[in-house]
Every structure is written in structure tokens, then in C-alpha cells.
């Protein structure tokens, strides 16, 4: 297995913008299509494919977590749901 090539591909993907725009399902279901979108047309051995899959799943997972945190922070401030206006400290408050 060529770990150097895999490492270079992962670093290239990371360098192509702030956010990896694919979720974990995308990576699992269509890795080859994602690589083509980055201009990567290499043929991988099974070991290389699964190593690359694991690396990109890790990136996708971090992006999903960051997005969840960002949404939660934008939605909730000091116990209040900013979208619905409810206050979680007071039962049945709307």
C-alpha cells in the first residue's frame, strides 16, 4: 500500500477549501465520484481504497460535528430557543 500517496490525497482534499462538503454517507456511498470531483482519477488497491475511505470519513465526521455545533449555537442562547422563542428554564413557557 502506498501510504505516501494516500497522505498526499488527504492533504490535497483538506487544502481545497474551508469545508469538506460531503457527509459520512456521501463518502461511504460514492467515494470514487468525490475523488473525481477533486480531479483524482487514480486506481487504488483494496487496502489503499479502504485507507482513503477511513481518512475521508474522519474529515466528514469532523465537518458534521462542527456543523451541528454551529447550528446548536445559533439556535440556543442562554436557555432560549431563538427560532421559537421558548425558554427552557420555565416549564410550559412559550
Image (cartoon, rainbow, N blue to C red):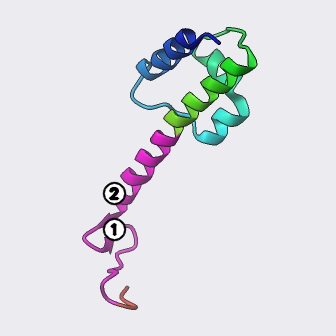
In the picture provided, is 14 more to the left or to the right than 6?
left
Which mark is drawn over residue 28?
none
Counting from the top left corner in percent of width and height, residue 16 is at: 44, 19
Q: Earlier in the sequence, mark 2 or mark 1?
A: 2
- Asked if residue 18 is positioned above or below residue 65 in the image, the reply reads above
SS class of the residue under badge 1? loop
Residue 83 horizontal/vertical position (percent): 38, 67
- For mark 2, what is the residue? 74
Apparent side of residue 3 relative to residue 42 in the rendered image (left or right): left
Is residue 71 magenta-colored?
A: yes
Residue at the spot x=44%, y=32% of the render?
A: 19
The boundaries of the magenta stretch are: 61-90
Where residue 14 sits, quadrant-wise, is top left
Who's the residue at 41% across and 23% down the image? Answer: 17
Mark 1 surroundings: few (<14), some (14-19) or many (≥20) residues within 10 A: some
Tell me the element at label 2: helix
Tag shown at residue 82: 1
Amino acid at each position: 500500500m502506498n501510504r505516501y500517496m494516500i497522505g498526499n490525497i488527504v492533504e490535497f482534499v483538506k487544502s481545497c477549501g474551508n469545508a469538506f462538503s460531503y457527509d459520512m454517507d456521501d463518502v461511504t456511498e460514492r467515494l470514487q465520484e468525490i475523488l473525481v470531483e477533486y480531479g483524482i482519477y487514480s486506481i487504488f488497491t483494496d487496502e489503499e481504497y479502504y485507507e482513503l475511505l477511513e481518512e475521508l470519513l474522519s474529515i466528514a465526521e469532523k465537518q458534521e460535528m462542527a456543523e451541528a455545533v454551529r447550528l446548536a449555537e445559533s439556535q440556543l442562547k442562554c436557555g432560549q430557543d431563538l427560532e421559537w422563542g421558548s425558554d427552557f428554564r420555565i416549564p410550559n413557557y412559550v
